Image: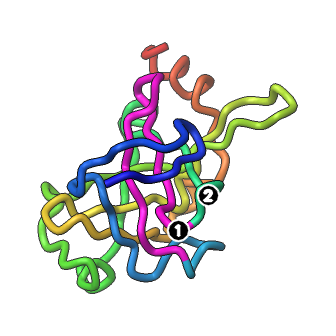
Amino acid sequence: MKVATKAYGLIDVDERQKIIFPQGLLGFETLKDYLLLDAERQPFYWLQSMDEEQVAFILVNPFLFRPDYEVNIGNEELADISLHSPEKALIFSIVTIPSDAGPMTANLQGPLIINRDNRTGKQAVLSDTRWRTRHDIMAELAATGNS
């Protein structure tokens, strides 16, 4: 299928790249259908809305720069995406790249959790005070020795 994207214009995508967020994302509750696309620069991904071409998010695996990251949420919270096994989950953080040349940050307080079997997802809100909405990715990579 062909989809208009913010990053790449009109592209052909595979149906398997489609991710449905039944409740949408925080601030984008009406947009439910997205595509998970590889970004030109690894280790990043694009989460592209299928309904609004200009709505796209840069994602990163938070464990790459925070190996101690924990997503502690109950099974009942994941029931709506039929996720019953942590091994079936893809976890991503939304990345912010400020226009003022400030640090690139990742939201560890609101991870995206995707059931890789049925390709449905949700955005969780973690109550653990270690995780904030703006973690400096490069500083945390340097702190772990992975830079």
Which quadrant holds residue 85? bottom left
x, y percent for residue 25: 53, 71
Residue numbers of the magenta segment: 31-51
Figure coloring: rainbow
Say whether residue 109 is left or right of residue 15: right
Q: Secondary structure at mark 2?
A: loop
Where does the N terminus fall, quadrant-wise?
bottom left
Amino acid bearing label 2: Val
Magenta span contains residue 46: yes
Front residue of this view, candidates 113 and 66: 113
Q: Residue at x 39, y 31 (%)?
A: 64
- Are the two marked residues, 1 and 2, in contact with CB atoms closer than 8 angstroms? yes
Residue 71 percent location from the top left of the image: 37, 59
Q: Local crowd at mark 1 within 10 Å, few (<14), some, or many (≥20)?
A: some
- Res 115 → quadrant: bottom left
Q: Disc 1 or disc 2, which is closer to the eye?
A: 1
Residue 40 percent location from the top left of the image: 46, 24
Q: Is residue 28 left or right of residue 117?
A: right
Q: Is residue 104 left or right of residue 140?
A: right
Residue 81 sits above or below residue 33 on the image? below
Q: Which residue is mark 1?
A: 51
Q: As shown in the figure, which amino acid type bears the numbered disc 1?
A: Asp
Residue to which mark 2 is pinned: 55
Where is 126 relative to 92, above or below?
below
